[in-house]
Amino acid sequence: MTWQSITIETGCEHADALADALLDAGALSASIEDADAGTPEEKPQFGEPGSITTPGWDRSRVVALLEADTDVDELLEACAAAIGLTEIPPYTHETVEEQNWVQLTQSQFDPIRVSDRLWIVPSWHEAPDPEAIVLVLDPGMAFGTGSHPTTRLCLEWLERTVTPGVSLLDYGCGSGILAIAAAKLGARDVLGVDIDRQAVSAAISNAERNEVSARFADSASEIEGQFDLVVANILSNPLKALAPAICSHVRPGGQLALSGILEEQAEELVAAYAPYIPLTIADTRDGWVCLAGTR
């Protein structure tokens, strides 16, 4: 079985409408990309939901998947008319052959080296260094495969900070990667909490796969007591709202690390946590920061 893939170059003012028109006209899928991706003109867009202030990429690329027998010119003529364009935008076309999509997807995820002794390895790969601490983690619906800068920042902080026997709370655990890493680094009492039950289910499965002892819960009400270390890799707005709750679980003398924070948001987060725990920038990567401090 084959399909058609078309790639249309357009400005940001038309990209969303064109993608919607393609879907309405029968396209199997439609996505919008930065046409300058991979070049010096690439424009990464970071931010929390609703916080992006730019309307998209100046040069956008709409990629659509179509049935093999679709008349592309006829389709695009109808879509252009539907969104008020007077002519068909330029496009390229290619045939998409049927493939082993599972194998293809897996091939896109290689082991990730966090440090000399810490690796994240999908289950279908061999560990590159059998002497290293290996986190076996497959991409899934729960956030956190180790590829995002904020996850890397937290993993590096954990590697520097975890000592044998410490207790740890992972607030907003996602896939459980940080809790699992802490357990493998020597933490003994490890709890991960997330409001997403699917994330908690994924975290439990990942902990079992990694053969570590860690507890996971889907409600903050299940957090009891205080911990030597608390890590929260979420987003700046919930981090601000949760400041009193998160800090209440850090024991006196304990340490806190926060991430999911853009560099321009760091000052505001430091101020929000100042009444509870003084924080400073522990590390930065690709426009993101990790804040850390001791209670």
Image: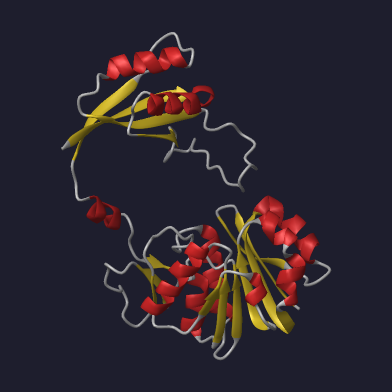
User: Where does residue 149 sit, x and y in percent of width and height?
Assistant: 52, 59
Residue at 61% in and 46% down: 49
Residue at 62% in and 40% down: 52
Instruction: State the scheme by which the image is colored.
Output: secondary structure
Above or below for 55 versus 289: above
Q: Residue furthest left?
A: 1
Q: Is residue 100 visible?
A: yes
Left or right of 210 on screen, residue 17: right
Residue at 36% in and 32% down: 63
User: Where does residue 203 sit, x and y in percent of width and height?
Assistant: 46, 71
Quadrant occupied by the N terminus: top left
User: Where does residue 165 sit, x and y in percent of width and height?
Assistant: 56, 91
Q: Residue furthest bottom?
A: 165
Q: How many marks?
A: 0
Left or right of 97 on screen, residue 140: right
User: Where does residue 184 sit, x and y in percent of width and height?
Assistant: 46, 82
Above or below for 31 versus 253: above
